[in-house]
Amino acid sequence: DDRIWSVPLAIAHSEGTTRVLLTESETVLTGIGDPKTANAGGAGFFRTQLTPETTIGTLASDFAAASPADRHTLVDDAWALTVAGRWEAVDFIDVAKACAGDDDLNVWQAVSAGLADICHILDGDALAAFQSEVRDIARPAFDRVGIEPGANDDDRTRERRATLIRLLGITGADEAIIDASAGMLDHPDASLRAAALTVATHHGDESMYQQVHAAWHAADTPQAEVRNLRALANFPSTALIDWLVDEILDGTIRTQDGPYLLRNALHNREAGERVWQRIKDNWDDINERFPSNSLSRMLEGITALDTDAGVADVAAFLAEHPLPQGEKQIEQLQESQRVNAAFRVREVDRLGHTLT
C-alpha cells in the first residue's frame, strides 16, 4: 500500500505547543524547542516513539507541566514500545517509577496494566525482586489516597484507590494489602469492595473459595452475583479451577456466564494451561452448549498462553477446529498471543538477570 495518510501532530515542547500536519512519509521539524510529546492531549490515533530518557524526564522532572492526558499517553506509548521490542521491560519499570508522584487514575491504570503483564512472565527470585519494585512504585501513591474512602472522594479517587489496591495486592503481593482485602469483602464502598475481592481471591484457599461460591449463590443483586461468580476464576489452585470448570460444563453455571469464566480462567497464572486442556477435551460439548457468538470471547484468554509451546498448540487446535464465526477476531487473538510470546522470549532472562 503506497498511500500516505495526513497526520495532524500537536507537539508539546519547552516553549509551548506546535501544530503540524504531516503529509509526507518523512518530515524533519526544526525550531520547536525541547520536544516532550508529539501527541499533546492524547487525541491522535498513533504512537509516538520517544527515548526512555525523554519520557522519564517528562514524567519526573516536568510532571507539573504535563497534563494528565499527556502523562497517560506517555505511559501507554511506553508500554506499546516495550511490547513491540523497541524498548526493554526495564525501561518501562523506570517509567513506572517516574509516576510515583502521580495521582491520576488513567496514568495508574496504564502503569498497572504494563506491570501486570511483566509480572506474568517472571518466576522465582526474579518475580520476588519485581514484586518488591512494584511495592516501592505504588506504595507512595496508595499512602496518599489511603485505604479508607474519604467523605469528599469523587468517583475517580475511589477507582484510583481500587486500582492501587489491585496493583499492590496482586502484582506486588503486598502482604498488608492482601490481609486487609480479606476483611473488606463486604465494605460499603463498591470500588473498594470489588478490588478487595479481586485481591483476596488471587491469594485465597479452598475455604475462601467456598465463601465466595456461597456468596455467588446468595447474591441479592445481579451485580453481586456476577462479581462473586467471576472472582472464582482467580484462585491460584488447579484443583479449585478444575471444580469451577466442572460446574461450567455440567450446567451448574449458566451458559451465558460460562464462556467469560473460561476466558478469565485462561488468564489464571497457575491453572491457565490446565483450563486450555479442559477446553480442548470438551470442545464439542462447549460448541453445543454455548452461544456461537460467545466462543470468540472465550478464546480471548489464549493471549495469556504466551509460551512457544502454547502458541503452537493453540494454532494447531484451532486449525483443526475452526469456529463458525469470528474468524477475524480469532486471527487477531492469535497474533496477540504470538506478540506476548515474543515478549516473554526477549525479556524473561534479560529482565530476570537485571532484577537479581
Image: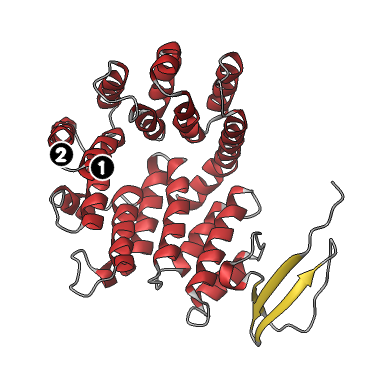
Residue 45 or residue 58, whichever sits in front = 45
Amino acid carrying mark 2 in the image: Ala
Q: What element carries label 2?
A: loop
Which of the numbered marks, if any, corresponds to residue 171? none
Looking at the image, residue 156 lies above or below residue 121? below
- Contact, CB < 8 Å: mark 1 with mark 2? yes
Left or right of residue 353: residue 123: left
> Could you classify mark 1 by the number of other residues whose Cα lies within 10 Å: few (under 14), some (14-19), or many (20 or more)?
some
Residue 192 or residue 176, whichever sits in front = 192
Q: Mark 2 points at which residue?
A: 219
Q: Distance between the residues labelled 1 and 2?
A: 9 Å
Residue 54 in view (yes/no): yes
Say which of marks 1 and 2 sits in front. 2
Which of the numbered marks, if any, corresponds to residue 227? 1
Q: In which quarter of the image is residue 31?
A: bottom right
Looking at the image, residue 312 lies above or below residue 229? above
Nearest to N terminus: mark 1 or mark 2: 2
Residue 71 or residue 5, whichever sits in front = 5
